[in-house]
Image (spheres, helix red, strand yellow):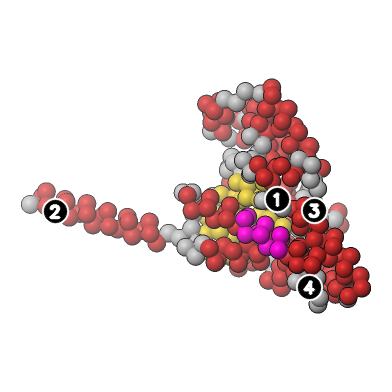
Amino acid sequence: MKSIVMLILIVCLSIFNLNAQQQVQKEIVLVGTMHTVPKIVKKSYKPMLKRAIKYNPEAIYVESPKGNDTLSWEYLKNGWSKSYKAFYYLSDSIQKTFTPNTKKFNTILKKTFNQMTKDDLDFLSNTFAFNRDNANYEFYEYIKKHGANGAKKPTRHEDGDLTFKLVINQNIKILKSMDDQRTNDKYHEGWSKCYKEGKNNGNNAIMKKLNKKDYNSAILPAIFRGLGKHTNKKKSLQTSHQLAAFTYTKNMTDGCKQGEKYWNERNMRMAKNIGESVKVSDKTRNIVIVGAAHIIGLEKELKENYPQFKITLVNEL
């Protein structure tokens, strides 16, 4: 009799645990950034950091190309970004001189940031550079420069004032990269064409008016340290998307169409990088920190292709 009761109890507990697991829905919170902010509003990321910490993410996704994304790096090694170009060739040189050690790497990552020595940090930086992992290379270089608590003064950039301080607070040792820049040359080409075409058809006048309106609407929030919240308002995000995707245009010319095509395709690939990673991860609370112009596109792609996840904008928390 006792055996039967015990068996029933075990079955009931198993069903309860299974139901509990099925009810836990994975979340993705999207945070739009301003990249670098002016000195006059250098503390703009502080309220955003507080909100991100309150959410208590288990995984942090950033706008940086994945180490194994050979197509993006093939472009970036001679592309638009001087820092990515420098990192690519640094990575190449380290691959010729450095020998990775998985056991040592994992042992160091078990330490707290305060416990990591300079040699530990050097080894981690070299390992990430060897793997062409720019996001984590930059993070551990930041720790080497500013210490385990991060920069005391505002860096005025999303990495130093938001992302890296959030990583430290959450004691997360590895950032997740999700960007894809393989077609950025075609996007910039379209942008250039669209601007030239817009000189005579009224598109540039519309763009300038929209930019001015967007700038003016941000002045008061910026003064009262609310620039981050303002940037993440739905209306602001839609304006940023319009400007980046050229959908503000009255005359959709060939150049503007090219720019829109490659902007949307980049967002689609970024969303796939995020969604596929979250799908196989054991983390429930995921946060994505990315330029504000990408948010509308990412929200659309994630909701359409990953309906099993809860997609939330940071202002909706």
Gap in angstroms between the C-alphas marked 3 and 1: 20 Å
Q: Which residue is found at the position 79% from the left and 42% from the top?
A: 78
Sequence-wise, the earlier of marks 2 and 3 is 2
Sequence-wise, the earlier of marks 2 and 1 is 2
Q: Is residue 26 magenta?
A: no
Label 4: how many Cα within 10 Å (few below 14, some 14–19, many 20+): some
Inspect this view and state whether residue 243 appears: no
Q: Amino acid at mark 2?
A: Val
Q: In the image, 139: left or right of 40?
A: left
Q: Nearer the viewer, mark 3 or mark 1?
A: 1
Q: Nearer the viewer, mark 1 or mark 4?
A: 4
Label 2: how many Cα within 10 Å (few below 14, some 14–19, many 20+): few
- Identify the magenta region: 261-270
Gap in angstroms between the C-alphas marked 1 and 4: 24 Å
Q: Which residue is mark 1?
A: 181
Nearest the viewer among 12 and 87 is 87
Sequence-wise, the earlier of marks 3 and 1 is 3
Q: Secondary structure at mark 1?
A: loop
Q: Which residue is found at the position 84% from the left and 71% from the top?
A: 207
In the depicted structure, whether residue 42 falls above or below residue 109: below
Q: Which residue is mark 4?
A: 252
